[in-house]
Image: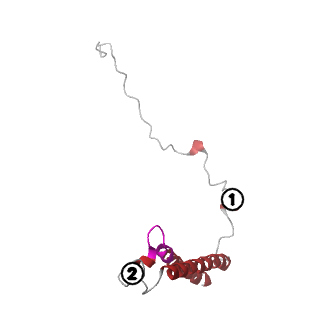
Amino acid sequence: MLYNILIAVITLICALLTLVVLLQNGQGQGLSGIGGGGGGGLGGNAGLGARRTADLLSKATSILGGAFLVLCILANFAIDRQTAPTNSVLEQGAPVGDIAAPSQTQSAVPVQTPPPPVNNDGSDSEN
């Protein structure tokens, strides 16, 4: 139950982290060029400034990244170990009695009869 809740929260954090990273200032203007700064529609000083937007998105990336890391480690400890199989295939060993010997198995390739020989010397072979 706890594991499923942690996975749901991790998924939400992944979606938010993706959104925050995509909004950050890259080669272009980022979120600050959408209207808050850069001569956009709202004027130079209205809305979010370039400096405040960069600080906010940088802090949000750090916080979401840290929360993602911590929740992933906690999810590892929250896995219910009793439902997981305890024996692996290697521990069980190969079943000796169930494997048929190769000589007793039927071939997967069908047996074909060879075609009759062809006489290439031009003479009639039925004489």
Q: Nearer the viewer, residue 12 or 103?
A: 12
Say few, some or many: other residues with alpha carbon within 10 Å of mark 1 (under 14 / 14 to 19 / 20 or more).
Answer: few
Q: Is residue 109 above or below residue 32?
A: above
> Which residue is located at x 47 percent, y 75 percent?
23
Callout 2–callout 1 Cβ contact below 8 Å: no
Kindly identify which residue carries mark 1: 90
| Residue 104 location (% of width, % of height) | 57, 44
Q: Quadrant of residue 28?
A: bottom left
**First in residue order: circle 2 vs circle 1:** 2
Q: Quadrant of residue 113?
A: top left
- Residue 35 is tagged as 2
Say few, some or many: other residues with alpha carbon within 10 Å of mark 2 (under 14 / 14 to 19 / 20 or more).
Answer: some
**Quadrant in which the N terminus appears:** bottom right
Q: Is residue 95 above or below residue 102?
A: below
| Residue 94 location (% of width, % of height) | 67, 56
Q: Is residue 79 visible?
A: no
Under circle 1, the secondary element is helix
Which amino acid type is shown beneath numbered disc 1?
Answer: Leu
Magenta stretch bounds? 19-30
Q: Residue furthest right?
A: 91
> Which residue is located at x 61 percent, y 84 percent?
2
Q: CA distance from mark 2 to mark 1?
A: 62 Å
Under circle 2, the secondary element is loop
| Residue 47 location (% of width, % of height) | 43, 86
Left or right relative to 50: residue 119: left
Left or right relative to 107: residue 1: right
